[in-house]
Amino acid sequence: MRIDTRLAERVKKINPSSTLAITSRAKKLISEGKDIVNFAAGEPDFDTPDFIKDQAISAIKGGFTKYTPSTGIPELKKLICEKFKKENQIEYAPEQIAVSSGAKHSIFNTLLALVNPQDEVIIPSPYWVSYPEMVNICEGSPRFVKTLPENNFKLTTEELEKQLSNKTKLLILNTPSNPTGCVYSRKELEEIARICVARKIFVASDEIYEKLIYDGQKHISIAGFNKDIYDLTITINGLSKSYSMTGWRIGYLGGPKDVVSAISNLQDHSTSCPVSISQKAAVAALSAPDDFSQKICKEFQARRDYMASRLNKIKKIKYVLPGGAFYIFCDISQTRLDSLTFASRLLEETFVSIIPGDGFGRNDYVRLSFATSTTQIEKGVDRIAAWLSKNT
């Protein structure tokens, strides 16, 4: 067998992560005792609340360790329906809900259910690193729309309409956004919805950061506007960011019955059910008052403001203040270094770990996470400033 025929074409289309070498190197340096400041984190640094962990322990002790229905236990689906109605003004029935092994899994299932070979999927750039690779696996065609800092990295209707074709099947929308932290307003989403309805374009609305939103802004779900856009939207969310449950792997989606039925069939024959114990933990999270996510949101806003105030003093770095999530996407073009070189040298020479922007579609940017303490933020930004003053 020839070596080039051993692997399926679909996996050959997947680009390796440009950040893997850096994150692996950072872990090695930490194991060697180096004092690494971690601005690369894609998860909250807070522990999962005890009341959620206690429910999981009770589930284990009570023997809730068997298979469940593939798309989630009824108790959890009911709570998700209530959450969507109360917080997002979206009415879903339990059969319109699919619980999965993380929001990433929900996104992947959505694309598998909707995207045919050669279908075009609109992806605003910068984008989360996995979006285009998932489209490639589905044999679709990613169609990137470059967004600009002067528009807070948000997709404009003018740019969207320019990119549409008779092959356009779906738009991936992420608000608040990873990596830019941009938050779409109601008016902006209404205009996007109008175009998608007119052209019968599906929307995969990734709302995983919805509870981490700052400056008094309100999260808006595009599916809540009217029946026309509701019938075209798959609303994707999870507990990873809002309840600091990244490792528990619980995501969920709501959408049209036929789409969710197809996703249910996919899940039946792939992962089957999400972890039973994690589902019980999710029930505890969604049953409780929303105190935890409100608390960490306030803390993240304070950290954002502190990191921004420190970055303001570095002339060679520019940024747009994020309205949500926990990242600052920094323009490093004045350094004349590409993002991978910048990130690699920063790690090796000053022990600060960041994420290069090339994986997000912007090689002149880097992503800094403020999911760490203010002490670490102070130390890390001091190191970046000193390094830039000497090396660029």
Image (spheres, helix red, strand yellow):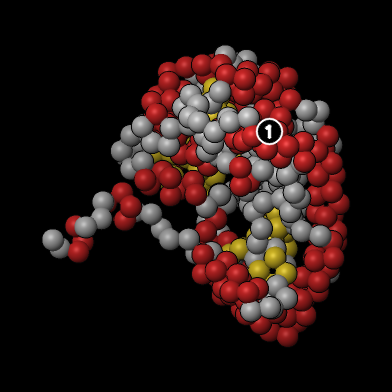
Is the C terminus in the top left, top right, bottom left or bottom right quadrant? bottom right
What residue is disc 1 on? Answer: 58
Give the crowd class for mark 1: few <14, some 14-19, many >=20 residues within 10 Å: some
Residue 72 sits above or below residue 363 on the image: above
Label 1 SS: helix
Residue 79 sits above or below residue 317 on the image: above
Q: Is residue 348 visible?
A: yes
- Residue 257 image position (x, y, % from top left): 47, 17
Q: Is residue 288 left or right of residue 125?
A: right
Q: Is residue 375 left or right of residue 233?
A: right
> Which residue does the image show at 19% across and 64% down from the upper left?
3
Q: Is residue 149 left or right of residue 254?
A: right
- Residue 375 image position (x, y, % from top left): 85, 65
Q: Is residue 213 visible?
A: no
How many tags in the picture? 1
> Which residue does the image show at 55% across and 49% down from the upper left?
127
Is the N terminus in the top left, top right, bottom left or bottom right quadrant? bottom left
> Which quarter of the figure has residue 332?
bottom right
Name the residue at the left extreme: 1
> Which quarter of the figure has residue 77?
top right
